[in-house]
Amino acid sequence: MIAPVALSCGEPAGVGPEIAGRAWQALGTELPFFLIGDPTHLPGDVPVVEIQEPTEATRASGSGLPVLRHDFDDPLTLGTPNPSHAQGVIDVIARGVDLVQSGAASALCTAPIHKQALQNGAGFAYPGHTEYLAALAGVDRVVMMLASDQLRVVPTTIHIPLTDVARHLTDDLLEETLRITHAALIRDFGIPAPRLAVAGLNPHAGEGGKMGREEIEVITPVLERLRLEGFDLRGPMSADTMFHGTARKSYDAAICMYHDQALIPIKTLDFDRGVNITLGLPFIRTSPDHGTALDIAGQGVANPTSLIEALKMAARMGASRRA
């Protein structure tokens, strides 16, 4: 029997409980998954089946949303994070990692967390989900990918000011990003010979050094080294030519140099269906590409599409990794 996908509850005061219920209503038994969290946090119109073990999720999903119970102290107020819930949110993530590493779950999908609430309530020492997952897994370097049916993008540098990008863009960082992405496309996406399109940092990919030298001094030497190992790499390319329909058919993932260079194209093409994936972990982790949306929590208007796509992506990647 294929293990189900584990879904961590995320911030209970946000839209996580609501979209978890809507995801079960959309997927039913088509894609068995279970929520790790407090069943009292779920909307009243969502039937819940408490389970004791992940193996019960497939059977339970025919009757309601399977929930592996994890109690939280103190009441829940939708839209307002409770500091006393912070440690519970952190513990649920760790519990999900334990389950996926043991093989009890095939993949981990994480509902959005509220980083400030975790820092204020439990002294959370990590910038976000990704860094905490890497620490739990004992991994030094991971890569963020945003993916949909239309495009896969990877930013080499992520959450840093634009003025710092050139300084942080080193040959080691770029090479690690390319290697991790290449390996993940083979292992987790079933692409035997990945084609990677690599963006330049500067307009027109530097135009021969007239608009910057990062392409000449950093990017091109890395690409040339990896091509000698058999990597199929295109670039450095002018980023403004990489994302139209014809160009996207020529590669399996686009490697970008900074956050917005990667995320603007995918969010423009497929805003609701983008999935956040962490590459380089010893297990599969996906997440919806949005935040906790505290301002609309409990109003019944949250869009579950990105979570549904994240669960589907997790299941597909799990099947590819097993194969």
Image (cartoon, rainbow, N blue to C red):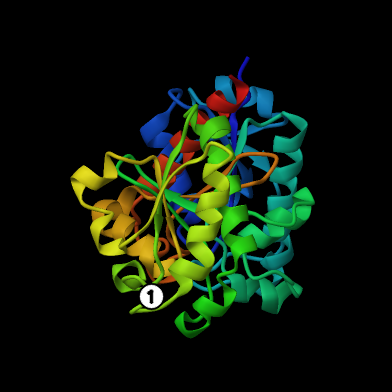
As helix, strand or loop, the secondary structure at mark 1 comes to: loop
Residue 236 shown left or right of residue 181 in the figure: left
> Which of the two residues, 226 or 307, is positioned nearer the viewer here?
226
Residue found 71% across the figure and 70% down from its top: 84
Residue 301 seen in the current view = no
Residue found 76% across the figure and 57% down from its top: 135
Residue found 45% across the figure and 58% down from its top: 15
| As drawn, 310 above or below 219 | above
Picture quadrant where residue 248 is located? top left
Residue found 53% across the figure and 82% down from its top: 164
Residue 1 shown left or right of residue 45 in the figure: right
**Which residue in the protein does label 1 denote?**
209
| As drawn, 126 above or below 138 | below
Alpha-carbon neighbours of circle 1 within 10 Å: few (<14), some, or many (≥20)? some
| As drawn, 287 above or below 81 | above
**Quadrant, the N terminus:** top right
Residue 270 shown left or right of residue 196 in the figure: left
> Which of the two residues, 323 or 212, is positioned nearer the viewer here?
212
**Quadrant, the C terminus:** top right
At which x and y percent is residue 8?
61, 48
Picture quadrant where residue 141 is located? bottom right
Q: Residue furthest bottom?
A: 163
What is the three-letter code of the residue carrying label 1?
A: Gly
Residue 125 seen in the current view = yes
> Which of the two residues, 323 or 306, is positioned nearer the viewer here?
323
At which x and y percent is residue 195?
42, 39
At which x and y percent is residue 123?
75, 75
Residue 295 shown left or right of residue 17 in the figure: left
